[in-house]
Image (tube, helix red, strand yellow):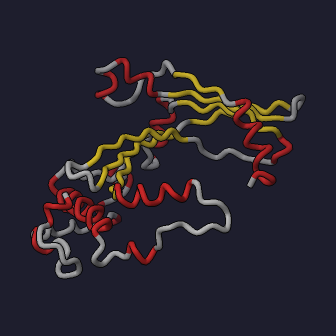
Amino acid sequence: MEEEFGEFARAFFASLKIGFSKQHPLYVRDRENPLDANRHLKVRFIIPDEFNVKVTAARVLTKWRTDSTSGHSFLEVTEVEQLQLDEKADPESGSCTVHAKAWTDKTRVEKKEQGEFPFWYEIAVGSTKLENEFLENESTRLGQKASWDAGEFSCEGNAAFYHMYAPAIEMARQLPQLGMFSDNSQTEKYTPKDLVYPTPPVAREPGNLFGNAVGWENEEDAL
């Protein structure tokens, strides 16, 4: 890893500069709170030509985490912001300077026609027990074996997996009642016969959340 990417990584971080953009965010919730405008970063870095690297995308990830009331699981929400790239080659220095910043109004209009937006959100449910177990991986050296074994964490009959899947399935079960349908503004581009809409999932009864696959008597213990 060091031999192949070390020199490039050091050159990248040596040139990296991060600041705040004065451009106002798109969303109403941000316009109501001027402080939220500081979330929009502008990034600059230099890529020497000798590495033969082409930058195709730059994104800002902002993560929030909250633990469950039971302490067995946690919810992690990731906001992903796509940045607009502006490149300027410098033949004299043999490098390319890349500026990444929030989308301009023109870019938003163009991207919206393609079904793209500057922000999207991802969620993940994790097990605090598994997280603590896997921390050992950070200090495990090449050739060493961790004290935990994958067989210990098989899905069936394992509390750690139950504490992840039970909240996640419950959240997915609530989705049909939340928000609104959005096809990323593609309806206006196609006639109705060209559109195929997915069939909404059917909500299941709480008692059928896991069926007989997992033998816990009280599902609420995991939520």
Residue 109: name its quadrant. Answer: top left
Q: How many marks?
A: 0
Q: Is residue 67 left or right of residue 49?
A: left
Q: Which one is nearer the viewer's eye here, 110 or 208?
A: 208
Q: Is residue 62 left or right of residue 1?
A: left
Residue 107, x across and y down, in percent:
51, 35
Res. 196 visible in picture: no
**Residue at 29% in and 21% down:** 32
Q: Is residue 139 left or right of residue 223?
A: right
Residue 141, x across and y down, in percent:
65, 60
- Quadrant placement of the N terminus: bottom right
**Residue at 34% in and 58% down:** 127
**Residue at 36% in and 54% down:** 124
**Residue at 27% in and 56% down:** 72
Q: Which one is nearer the viewer's eye here, 215 or 193?
A: 215
Residue 30: name its quadrant. Answer: top left
| 127 versus 30 height, above or below | below
Residue at the bottom extreme of this rendering: 212
Q: Which one is nearer the viewer's eye here, 113 or 36?
A: 36
- Quadrant placement of the C terminus: bottom left
Residue 95, x across and y down, in percent:
82, 35
Residue 183, x across and y down, in percent:
33, 53
Residue 163: name its quadrant. Answer: bottom left
Q: Is residue 33 left or right of residue 11?
A: left
Residue at the front extreme of this rendering: 147
Res. 146 visible in picture: yes
